[in-house]
Image (spheres, helix red, strand yellow):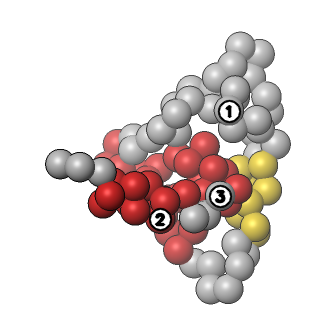
Amino acid sequence: MFLSVVDSPPAEPPLSMRQEGGKKIFKKRFNVAASRARNQMWIVHSLNHETDLKPGDYRRRLIEHALDPNAWERRVAEAAEAPS
């Protein structure tokens, strides 16, 4: 599956945030799109996720996941090992 997260670079980064929106529409759209991949998912993007997108933006989170899909496993393992 190819998923496009293409946008024109902002004149003044970062772009406006894409979070949940009304009725969590953006969250639903990204979740449905990403969950349809059966074997592979290729993220096509034109933005620098570190400068053009704000932390927490669904587009940024999707690009970061594609770049490092095991990051969440490491965070869970680190949290489990952390003293309470």
Query: Tag 2's secondary structure?
Result: helix
The reply to whether callout 3 and callout 1 are in contact (CB within 8 Å) is no
Label 1 neighbour load within 10 Å: few <14, some 14-19, many 20+:
few
Quadrant hosting residue 15: top right
> Is residue 30 depicted above or below 13 in this figure?
below
In percent of width and height, residue 79 lies at 33, 54
Pick the front one: 26 or 70: 70
Based on the displayed image, in which of its 4 quarters is residue 8 positioned?
Answer: top right
Q: Is residue 18 visible?
A: no
Of the two numbered discs 3 and 2 on the same chain, state the one appearing first in sequence.
3
Q: Give x and y (percent) for residue 83.
A: 23, 49
Name the residue tied to disc 2: 73
Identify the mark nearer the N-term, 3 or 1: 1
- Say which amino acid is labelled 1: Glu
Question: Which amino acid type is shown beneath numbered disc 3?
Answer: Asp
Q: Which residue is mark 3?
A: 68
